[in-house]
Amino acid sequence: MHRRNWFEQALFSAMTAGFTLNEMAQPKLIAQDARNSSLDSGKLRITNIKTVLTQPSSSRLIVVKVETNEPELYGLGCATFTQRARTVETAVNEYLKPFLIGKDPTRIEDTWQSSFVSSYWRNGPVLNNALSGVDMALWDILGKRAGLPLYELLGGKCRDAVDTYRHASGSSFAEVTESVNKFMSEGYRHVRVQAAVPGLVTYGARASGDVRSDLPENNRPDIWEPRPYVQMIPQLFEHLRQELGDQVELLHDVHERIPPILAMQLVKDLEPFHPFFVEDPFSPEDVGYFRHLRAQTTTPIAMGELFNNPNEFIDLIKDRLIDFIRVHLSQIGGLTPASKLASFCEYFAVRTAWHGPGDVSPVGHAANIHLDITTPNFGIQEAREFSTAEQDVFPGCPELKNGYYWLSDRPGLGIELDEQLAKRFPITDEPPFSLQWGNLRRADGSSTKP
């Protein structure tokens, strides 16, 4: 009896141990299967990732092309960080490419999450732009494989076209007025207005300060003083309202280059002229001032083009301290995080106004518009016309008509890249990046925010 009990106990222990060992091995086998599945010849997988650097207009553009083992199935994404083009190129080619070759391009969320943490240290603008290029390209692949425009995969259209704004500027109030009138005649209902301050290098308008051509380009002081600007911009708005009435929405970009207390004064002084929004009154380092600003004015505020990670904008949104989120899609990592951000903003009545200047490639603009057209809390889209060279290099550029962007029903992002033609427009490497921001100085010679 004793021996039989001992035998039964030993058998039970062996069976239990075998079961436990098998269970312990199972996660490892699942993980191994997951790794192997991406290399299975019958599965769709990434076979190559490359960067295309081109400059058909004034800005250095970086486009990522993700190729697959399915013939002619590839995707394009915008990774443009024009001031650091070569650095982004290196990040894509030397880090993301070897990490992603052989993986399933349809696992977009998993690719984004694993790439984001792959260096352990969280991303800044260089790595986020590199990741954005891949992310947008994967969405492009998904749409092409499904035979659907990307907006169908993002939930379908909320609107038929995307309302936009353009930039009017000048060295005098008369020039700004003339520029606004031109855009209005073309059907635009929203116009950003900037005017040069006499004797100073002013953001968004033709520089009227002296350029020291006798000095090296990396040591030419661009002189800027905030108080004359703060005094002049309300006068510009007053002039435009007298000339144009309320038939056009006016916007203005402070570009974070004045002290916070002066920014608060400026935004309050503009309130009687009903701006559609005032952009970037504070720098990212000074976001604590938004709470004070909200308590003192009803002028709508836009913010976000310099943001890199959610911690920079979550509190501003949930506390309803801004009215428009202005992030640069590639700066935060592409369509995947931007789509989540748009949905988050919806619950706090914050509208989207994605960054869309000349240093966003046509591929990036297409991504902006696909997101705009599917976002219920869309606000406005910064727009630009594409040069003939850009349209040739990027067939399928978004169409601007009567102040609206219009999308085609082509699969994916709906835009292509002529790689051979792109080679005819190599990026300028001298100087290696824009020097103007670092050259900005106060009259006493001290550096100031751009």
Image (cartoon, rainbow, N blue to C red):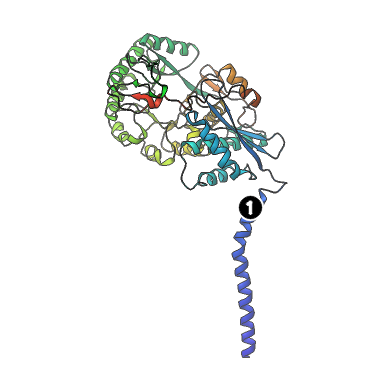
Query: Percent from the top left, x then y, of residue 66?
Result: 63, 36
Q: Residues within 10 Å of mark 1 (few under 14, many from 20)?
A: few
Number of numbered callouts drawn:
1
Position of residue 95 in the picture relative to residue 249 (left or right):
right
The residue at the far bottom in this view is: 1
Mark yes or no: residue 383 visible.
yes
**Residue 280 occupies which quadrant of the picture?**
top left
Query: Percent from the top left, x then y, of residue 186?
Result: 50, 13
Question: Compared with residue 68, is residue 436 higher up or lower down, i.e. above or below?
Answer: above
* Residue at image coords 42%, 35%: 307
Mark yes or no: residue 159 visible.
no
Question: Compared with residue 43, is residue 354 higher up or lower down, i.e. above or below?
Answer: above
Q: Judge by depth and name the residue closer to the eye, 412 or 21.
A: 21
Q: Amino acid at mark 1?
A: Ala
Label 1, secondary structure: give it: helix
Q: Judge by depth and name the residue closer to the eye, 375 or 385.
A: 385
* Residue at image coords 63%, 59%: 29
The quarter in which the N terminus is drawn is: bottom right
Query: Percent from the top left, x then y, of residue 110?
Result: 57, 46
Query: Percent from the top left, x then y, of residue 46?
Result: 65, 41
The quarter in which the C terminus is drawn is: top left
**Residue 416 occupies which quadrant of the picture?**
top right
Q: Which residue is mark 1?
A: 34
Position of residue 420 in the picture relative to residue 224 (left or right):
right
* Residue at image coords 30%, 16%: 232
Q: Judge by depth and name the residue closer to the eye, 195 or 447.
A: 447
Q: Judge by depth and name the residue closer to the eye, 334 or 56.
A: 56
Position of residue 66 in the picture relative to residue 200 (left or right):
right
